[in-house]
Image (tube, coloured by chain):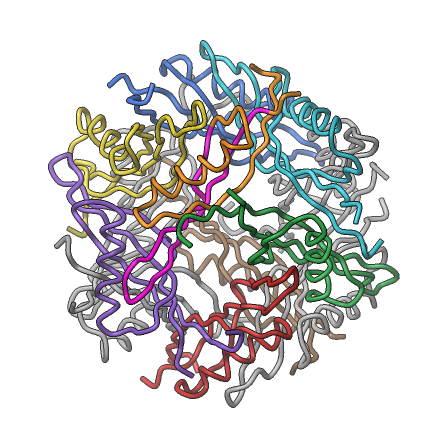
Chain colours: A red, B green, C orange, E cyan, F purple, I yellow, J brown, K blue
Amino acid sequence: MSNHVYKSIELTGSSATGIEDAVANAIAVAAKTVRHMHWFEVTETRGHIEDGQIAHWQVTVKIGFTLEG
Amino acid sequence: MSNHVYKSIELTGSSATGIEDAVANAIAVAAKTVRHMHWFEVTETRGHIEDGQIAHWQVTVKIGFTLEG
Amino acid sequence: MSNHVYKSIELTGSSATGIEDAVANAIAVAAKTVRHMHWFEVTETRGHIEDGQIAHWQVTVKIGFTLEG
Amino acid sequence: MSNHVYKSIELTGSSATGIEDAVANAIAVAAKTVRHMHWFEVTETRGHIEDGQIAHWQVTVKIGFTLEG
Amino acid sequence: MSNHVYKSIELTGSSATGIEDAVANAIAVAAKTVRHMHWFEVTETRGHIEDGQIAHWQVTVKIGFTLEG
Amino acid sequence: MSNHVYKSIELTGSSATGIEDAVANAIAVAAKTVRHMHWFEVTETRGHIEDGQIAHWQVTVKIGFTLEG
Amino acid sequence: MSNHVYKSIELTGSSATGIEDAVANAIAVAAKTVRHMHWFEVTETRGHIEDGQIAHWQVTVKIGFTLEG
Amino acid sequence: MSNHVYKSIELTGSSATGIEDAVANAIAVAAKTVRHMHWFEVTETRGHIEDGQIAHWQVTVKIGFTLEG
Amino acid sequence: MSNHVYKSIELTGSSATGIEDAVANAIAVAAKTVRHMHWFEVTETRGHIEDGQIAHWQVTVKIGFTLEG
Amino acid sequence: MSNHVYKSIELTGSSATGIEDAVANAIAVAAKTVRHMHWFEVTETRGHIEDGQIAHWQVTVKIGFTLEG
Amino acid sequence: MSNHVYKSIELTGSSATGIEDAVANAIAVAAKTVRHMHWFEVTETRGHIEDGQIAHWQVTVKIGFTLEG
Amino acid sequence: MSNHVYKSIELTGSSATGIEDAVANAIAVAAKTVRHMHWFEVTETRGHIEDGQIAHWQVTVKIGFTLEG
């Protein structure tokens, strides 16, 4: 395992439901084009407010995946 | 849109349920006196422990709203 | 001077022109209701992109003013 | 209350469900050996990805408790 | 207690004597208009120098108080 | 809007003129290959000095764009 | 000296008097169980407010001591 | 030189030997697909422990390269 | 080039005009006594307000130059 | 794996040789009393200078291990 | 005032008494060679422990002074 | 020892070999003009890439030395 090289990208997922769902959405979109994803880290948690209520959450994650070197 | 000026305030909401509910509580109280809120950002997630269990969550958010200039 | 108490607020000004103008806009709006402003500090510089070009700058400043204690 | 001394430790709890459950797991394990816990603060939110989906969340918390001095 | 919402403001107090006195000055001025203050956190410690000696300390604190929701 | 996923990339633009122009240069190059850019954030402002004068500015921006998921 | 290994722990001391006394209280409690303490670093300075006045200071310190390896 | 635009990516290289070797591994893999790399910056140094010993180092680097604009 | 040693100093330049001019002023003063300056990095952007308007900008830069070893 | 709870401690190892050796020394001492260590992260790299030369390196690591819950 | 250029240096003063005295000691030594000092900012507060008690405080300050350009 | 005042300067050393050698080069150059150096702290680790390989490392250190007050 010690010779692998990982790349990380930064995505922001959104969801009307909450933080976990916004992260899942970001990873689901990434999974369409990126293989070998291993971990994520939440780097920012924001959201939009409409009419005095939370309209949706926007959660930014770093996602790490193995480069097929 | 480019001439608007936004102000941000910092509130801490609490909830026995979880992070999303604590943020919703903070925004609900803000909505009583602040209009034109547009976004929030979570800046701190803490909580209190009683009898070895989470008693309530305390989540701090910056909330941005348009100044009616 | 050593007995003064200062309060700081956080505003975001925007401008199609650039950073200095966005800050000036934020301070101009603040000046309508806040007196005795003394300093500002830029804490975030962002902007919006439309059609592949900068549409406007959004610059966040902390502004400090004397509380008339 | 002003003479108490608090110690903080750093634990990482995990959960397949979400952030709140991961924190609750960390505190439940701590409660087996630590008494007089009062507060926690989330310092890092990460997770593992398997087959393009979130496998489990890993949330790091600082936990503060009174030293019985 | 878990339904309270707190607001935090940022003040800078000054004092020729030292850090504790500068914080006390900031809180004393806040107490004239803000009720239900509960905690403070020191976020910056600065000062002015005149004739090669400390003229006064300037200490910035975040102060948290309950919003009467 | 709440189901969009955004990706952010980090570019450094340079300019002999100033900060705004360096950012515009970075975005102009990005626009050749990236569509649906929405925002940028300045993360670093540096520059080179030649013969005791500013030779050019180098400004790093995070640029966010919608993934066409 | 170059083969020593140090461990650091994080304590929060409190005092009605001020910062230095709060730190001294934390170290005095630590000294009951920890030997070979060498240094400390203040990482957070907070406090409680009661009736519009500072009730007590809460100062967090990292304390380093030699592990007897 | 002042009209160049640089892009930075983030990779994590690993090595059983040490930090320099882990960085070299990351750059060697990047060199297979990225041309015109100019600089790197170490942003995180971690590692895995097996049987009470360092199994391998994991070093994260930002790598900057010229966009052929 | 790999044997050079650089020193960095921190200066704050001011200008009634804007950020670029404040940096240029700082570098111009440094150029009177420092040779072989190569780069700068903006570390803080502040300013003074008089009569509700920006009176001057104060921009802090780290400046790096070769030590003639 | 998703139900494990990890604890992290902070140690500083030293070495006359270099960074990797200082980390190895810290982990070797930890291994005498801590089982199930899994990862480390370097959080600070310092050293002592004697007679104008590096006398020894002091490297601080966070070390994570499984709590046997 | 808007054409002044300031330089900042970083000193660490120590004192057996407390934080304010350590800062005053640093400034007193600086005053022997530096003129036109205007401000300071505390950037680190540490100390040494001997026999389970605070032996002395070590407080690091940035000190700003006008360059006579 | 408690009355000493320390000054810190920031240097960047470079080396084709690695991090330790780059730091040693910085300290060796400093030793030509600075006496009574006591400690260093690594604040940044960067490097240059040529032809897809590390050309040299550039490591920035703060170096502390006693002011002969």
Residue F7 x/y as whole percent: 40, 72
Left or right: C26 in relation to F48: right
Residue B46 appears in the figure: no
Query: Compared to C46, does J3 lie above or below?
Result: below
In the foreground, B69 or J64: B69
Residue C58 x/y as whole percent: 41, 50
In terms of image quadrants, where is residue E14? top right
In the foreground, A51 or B11: A51
| Residue found at x 50% / y 55% | J43
Query: Compared to B32, does B51 lie above or below?
Result: below
In the picture as drawn, the residue positioned furthest to the front comes out as: B69
Residue K9 x/y as whole percent: 38, 28
Q: Is residue C50 magenta?
A: yes
> Secondary structure of the magenta portion, mostly?
strand
| Residue found at x 60% / y 63% | A50
In the picture as drawn, the residue positioned furthest to the right comes out as: B51
Residue K61 appears in the figure: yes
Q: Is residue I56 magenta?
A: no
Q: Where does the C terminus of chain C fall, quadrant-wise? A: top right
Q: What stretch is highlighted in magenta?
A: C39-66
In terms of image quadrants, where is residue I6? top left
| Residue found at x 83% / y 61% | B55
| Residue found at x 31% / y 84% | A69
Left or right: F58 in relation to C35: left
Residue C35 x/y as whole percent: 54, 26
In the foreground, A67 or A30: A30
In the foreground, F38 or B10: F38
In the picture as drawn, the residue positioned furthest to the top comes out as: E51
In terms of image quadrants, where is residue F49? top left
Q: Where does the N terminus of chain C fall, quadrant-wise? A: top right
